[in-house]
Image (cartoon, grey):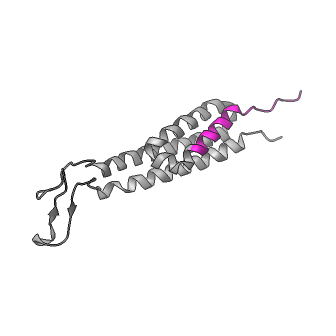
Amino acid sequence: MSEEKPTVAFILSLIAGIFILLGGGMMSMFAPYGFGGMMNGYQGYGGYGGNAWYGGMMGRYSFGPGFGMMGGLGYGFGFFGILGLIFGLIVIISAIMLNNKPEQHSTWSILIIIFSVLSIFGSAMGGFGIGLILGLIGGILGMTWKPPQSKA
């Protein structure tokens, strides 16, 4: 006789973790480009040996990057993207453990719910919003899942 598992909760949580992971990956891709920030200037290719800086309000002037309004936004994207990657991995691992150890369904479901909610800070609004919603539904279904009673 096969063991009953919270299959729907597992599938929804796994898909949620994948969306959160993808959202974190998308956000972390913005980091290397720096995105100088709003009103922070632009480094053009013309004039002065191909290294001209066009100054922005409260930002870059002629001698390198400044920290204007929202100046280090690209680095923030990178940090939050990495958080999204970590949260997505935790949700995926928790979903797999929910499927492998259904007797501990409460523990793994709580982790899925917590890190799905935290993913709103770490991966493009919780895996484009889809990861957040699916993680909450999957976690709640995992919490409310009841193992079948043995017939003796």
Tell me the residue at 17%/62% (across/down). 54
User: Is 102 situated left or right of 131 in this image?
Assistant: right
The extreme top residue here reads 152
Quarter holding residue 35: bottom left
User: Is 133 situated left or right of 27 in this image?
Assistant: right
Residue 132 in the image: state x and y as whole percent.
55, 44
User: Is 85 situated left or right of 133 in this image?
Assistant: left
The quarter of the picture where the C terminus appears is: top right
Residue 97 seen from this side? no
Q: Is residue 19 above or below residue 143?
A: below
Q: Which residues are magenta?
A: 133-152
Residue 1 seen from this side? yes
Q: Nearer the viewer, residue 145 or 37?
A: 37
Residue 73 in the image: state x and y as whole percent.
31, 49
Tell me the residue at 14%/66% (across/down). 52
Q: Is residue 36 on the magenta stretch?
A: no
Tell me the residue at 54%/51% (across/down). 19
Q: Is residue 139 on the magenta stretch?
A: yes
The quarter of the picture where the N terminus appears is: top right
Tell me the residue at 33%/46% (across/down). 76
Magenta portion: prevailing SS class: helix
Residue 21 in the image: state x and y as whole percent.
50, 50
Q: Is residue 80 above or below residue 29?
A: above
Q: Nearer the viewer, residue 149 or 19?
A: 19
Residue 12 in the image: state x and y as whole percent.
64, 46
